[in-house]
Image (cartoon, helix red, strand yellow):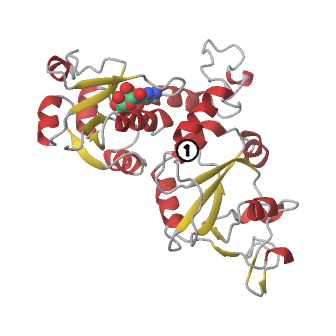
Amino acid sequence: MNPVRVWGNGCYDVFHFGHANFIRQAKMMGDYMIAGVHGDADIMQNKGKPVMDQVERARMISAVRWVDEIQENVPYGNILNTLNDYNCNFCVHGDDIARDANGNDIYQECKDTNRFRECKRTEGISTTELIDRILLGTDMNFFGPEFSRKGSKKKSRIMPREYYEEKIKEFTPPNSFPKEGDTILYTQGVFDLFHSGHVNYLEKCKNSEQNGFLIVGILSDEEVNRVYGTFPITNVHERALALLSCRYVDQVVIGVSFCVTEEIISKHKVTVLSGNISPRSWLCEGCITLSTGSHIFEASLHNPLMVAPSLNSISYKWNIN
Ligand code: CTP
């Protein structure tokens, strides 16, 4: 039987886990998922100026683990023609109506010919929501009761913890355990408003070793606030979901502290610390502690990672850019 080819077009502006969840659900409806990303000019004409340009938007979608193929700069309308061009069985869209500049449903022809499928939009996240949060500022945690700024008419749309936990289960790849012969790599960071710079960085981390199994630690919201003095725009669960949707990430550790701890290294059997671990990490008490072979690093601005004698087998690659 021929594989069922699924089409999912969109603007995918300011990437978030709602986009990834849409693609995940669409892929489950068939075998082969093609994501179509609209070009800047078409979006400008039909919706308004996108925040991210088409190259950045396409890069983000190409990194989503459930995407098999990506088509860039696809037209906003004429989706039935596009389905035929790419030999797709049907297209999928969230349960809101997408209209063109003239107010027409861009999927009407596909609906009329039974080549349209719908999936539920992911609650609690959207590009508009993120832009609103950026405008509100980062002096609040976008999770829990602090979200609504005093005096603001804006209502909190943050979802309960259980909602995120359920999604995290759905996003976790089935093979999220290292195999025999894998090199376990670890990096960590904030990864707020997951963007193409993060994706490029994670790809390099993942490919820095053959058979690399990449574990990514995500700083908790409180830790971001403690170290940087602001809260992130996306809360720790939202950041985890964006990372889990990325094909270069094999596992996440949610809510780590700024300093890489010995506990992380030993619990996850990390053999390589990968990427740019912030040079500020040496400032913290009890921070990482690393060695490469017999070389012991001193804690200094130039060698930010301190060494624990117990971690002699760890090597690290930083500034891999
Ligand atoms: N989508 C979704 N859940 C969200 C956001 C988007 O299921 N929270 C779906 C849309 O319904 C669409 C696809 O993701 O099928 C791509 O959406 P896009 O064209 O980027 O734009 P919007 O629907 O306007 O959503 P957003 O503004 O959040 O990008």
Give above or below for 21 relative to 290: above
Tell me: 168 left or right of 63: right
Other-residue count near label 1 (Cα within 10 Å), few / some / many at <14 / 14–19 / ≥20: some
Nearest the eye: 90 or 225: 90
Q: Position of residue 172 (x, y in %)?
A: 55, 44
Q: Which image quadrant shows ligand 1?
A: top left
Any atom of ligand 1 within 8 Å of the CB at mark 1? no
Please tell me which residue is depicted at 52% across the width and 48% down the height of the picture: 174
* Number of numbered discs on residues: 1
Which quadrant, please, contains the N terminus?
top left
Closest to the observer: 9 or 151?
9
* Residue under the image location 71 percent in, 66 percent down: 269
Disc 1 is placed on an element classified as loop
Residue located at (42% from left, 38% from top): 24
> Is residue 99 in sight in this rendering?
yes
Q: Write the residue at 50% across / 74% down.
A: 210
| x and y, in percent, of residue 283 in the image | 82, 62
| Amino acid at circle 1 | Thr
- For residue 78, say whether it is visible: no
Front-most of residues 31 and 206: 31
Rendering coords of residue 208 (x, y %): 52, 72
Farthest residue in the right direction? 285
In which quarter of the view is residue 14 placed?
top left
Residue 225, percent from left and from top: 75, 42
Q: Nearer the viewer, residue 240 or 165?
A: 165
The image quarter in which residue 275 lies: bottom right
- Residue position for label 1: 172
Q: Residue furthest front?
A: 1
Q: Is residue 158 left or right of residue 244?
A: right
Q: Residue furthest bottom?
A: 294
